[in-house]
Every structure is written in structure tokens, then in C-alpha cells.
Image: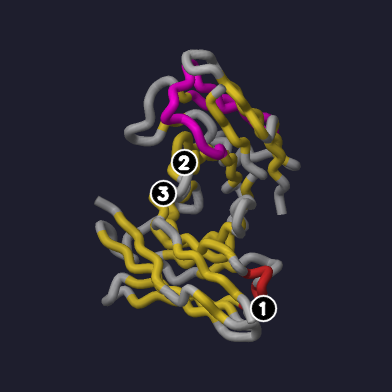
């Protein structure tokens, strides 16, 4: 069974750097045509894709957030780490990681972690 | 980025009745391989999104056959043949033609 689980801070202050970890099981981060993506969802709003990292180490970032994002993986720990700098209250959202198959679809998703940014 | 537009945004449905959700993209989602890179997700209350339909018309594993997807190039439809109480939630379309994935605004299905 493939599962993904997000972990990270619940509450942050403006200007801080967010670091989230996605721990996967049931598949390897070296599997061909597989990768992990990060997506976020502000309360009551739609979904916004943030970044992909693929088994061949290719990385793609959202154009609008590229300057603030960094994604990496540790295959030995089956973990993908997303960092976002200079957090602002508008970044308050539930952050999800999901497996991406090829570049075709996201499945499954983790349960998500709510990150609140407030002074 | 490709813009995804869903309609309606709210959909009240009587159990046992059919339901239909439309999704339109700002540019064609058809790849040169003939596949349309359009997926449908359902986010049930308090849960993460779950894959319903991939590549426009393929039901994901475990998805009931009352769900079906159709369409091509820019216009796509998700149909539920007979709505059940467990189908409530927000439905999203998502394009994956471009690696910079984008989602529709979501359609909230509620039971009358």
C-alpha cells in the first residue's frame, strides 16, 4: 500500500522559513516514472501546485513561487523535503504531498498538514 | 499557465439523480500521443483529494462505475449516473499536460 505523510510546524511567524517533510512508503523514490509533488490549499480555497521532484532528480517549481522554494529528497530515508522562505500570513494553508506518476496524475495524496502563519 | 474553469461551482443533487460537472481549459490538453491530460479528483469533507478519473476517461482503481469522464481538447465532463450520499464533497479538475499543474476552482456537490 502506497502512503505519504507530511510533517512540519503547525504555527509560524512571518519571515520565517518553512520546512516540510514528506515520508513515503510502498514505493521507492528511485522508481522510474515516479516522483513526489507538493500542493497547498488555503482554507476554503482551491489547490495550488508548488513543486515536483522526480526519480531522475529532475526538479520543477511553480513559476510564481520559484524564488522561495527548494525541494530535495533523501532516498535512503524515503523522504522529500520542501522549504519555503519568507513565510507570510497569505501562505497559511494545508500542505499536501502526493505521488506523481510520470507527469500524468497525482495519486495518492497524503493527509496534509495545516500550517498557520501569524504574528 | 493553463487556466481551468469549472461549472457549476455549486451543485445540489437529489440522491439517485444524475449529476454533471464541466471543466474547460484555456488551451488544448491533448498530447501528441493522443491522450488528454485531464484528471478529476474528489475531496470529501475533512479529507485529502482522491483520484477519480485520469487521462480524461479512465476510472481509477476502486472508483465506482457510476462515475465517468469524457471530453477532449478543451472541454471535459465528469458524470455521476446516480448520486449517493457518500459523493458529497468538492470535485476538482486538474490539467497535467504542462508540468506546471493547475486545478479548477472546484465544484461543491451537496445532497438536497
**Quadrant hosting residue A89:** bottom right
Q: Are marks 2 and 1 in contact (CB under 8 Å)?
A: no
Badge 1: chain ID: A
Please tell me the numbered disc located at residue A67. Answer: 1
Is B94 in front, or is B7?
B7
Residue B66, percent across and down?
43, 20
How many residues crowd around disc 2 within 10 Å: few (fewer than 14), some, or many (20 or more)? some
Query: Which chain is home to disc 3?
Result: A
Q: Are marks 3 and 1 on the same chain?
A: yes
The one nearer the camera, A51 or A14, is: A14
Q: Compared with residue A102, is residue A37 higher up or lower down, i.e. above or below?
A: below
Is residue A97 shown in magenta?
Answer: no
Other-residue count near label 3 (Cα within 10 Å), few / some / many at <14 / 14–19 / ≥20: many
- Nearer the observer: mark 2 or 3; the answer is 2
Q: Nearer the viewer, residue B71 or B11?
A: B11
Residue drawn 49% across the image and 69% down it: A58
Q: Is residue B72 magenta?
A: yes
Find disc 2 in the rendering and name its residue. Answer: B44
Query: Position of A91 compared to A104: left or right?
Result: right
For mark 1, does the 10 Å Cα neighbourhood hold few (<14), some (14 to 19), or many (20 or more) residues?
few
Protein chain holding label 2: B
Task: Look at the picture and state if A85 lies above or below A101.
Answer: below
User: Is B111 located above or below residue B26 in the figure?
Assistant: above
Magenta-colored span: B68-91
Q: CA distance from mark 3 to mark 1?
A: 27 Å
**Residue situated in front as seen by the camera: B100 or A15:** A15
x and y, in percent, of residue A71 in the image? 50, 75
Amino acid at each position: 500500500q502506497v502512503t505519504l505523510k507530511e510533517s512540519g510546524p503547525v504555527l509560524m511567524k512571518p519571515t520565517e522559513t518553512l520546512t516540510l517533510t514528506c515520508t513515503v512508503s510502498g514505493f521507492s523514490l528511485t522508481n522510474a516514472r515516479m516522483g513526489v509533488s507538493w500542493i497547498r490549499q488555503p482554507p476554503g480555497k482551491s489547490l495550488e501546485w508548488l513543486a515536483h521532484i522526480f526519480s531522475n532528480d529532475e526538479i520543477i517549481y511553480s513559476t510564481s513561487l520559484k524564488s522561495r522554494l527548494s525541494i530535495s529528497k533523501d532516498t535512503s530515508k524515503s523522504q522529500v523535503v520542501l522549504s519555503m522562505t519568507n513565510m507570510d500570513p497569505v501562505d497559511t494553508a494545508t500542505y499536501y504531498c502526493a505521488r506523481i506518476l510520470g507527469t500524468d496524475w497525482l495519486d495518492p495524496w497524503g493527509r496534509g498538514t495545516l500550517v498557520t502563519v501569524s504574528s | 499557465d493553463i487556466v481551468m474553469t469549472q461549472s457549476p461551482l455549486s451543485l445540489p443533487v437529489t440522491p439517485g439523480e444524475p449529476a454533471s460537472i464541466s471543466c474547460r481549459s484555456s488551451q488544448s490538453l491533448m498530447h501528441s500521443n493522443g491522450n488528454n491530460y485531464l484528471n478529476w479528483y474528489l475531496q470529501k469533507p475533512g479529507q485529502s483529494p482522491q483520484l477519480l478519473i485520469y487521462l480524461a476517461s479512465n476510472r481509477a482503481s476502486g472508483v465506482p462505475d457510476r462515475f465517468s469522464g469524457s471530453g477532449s481538447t478543451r472541454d471535459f465532463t465528469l458524470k455521476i449516473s446516480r448520486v449517493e450520499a457518500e459523493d458529497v464533497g468538492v470535485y476538482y479538475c486538474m490539467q497535467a499536460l504542462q508540468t506546471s499543474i493547475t486545478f479548477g476552482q472546484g465544484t461543491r456537490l451537496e445532497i438536497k
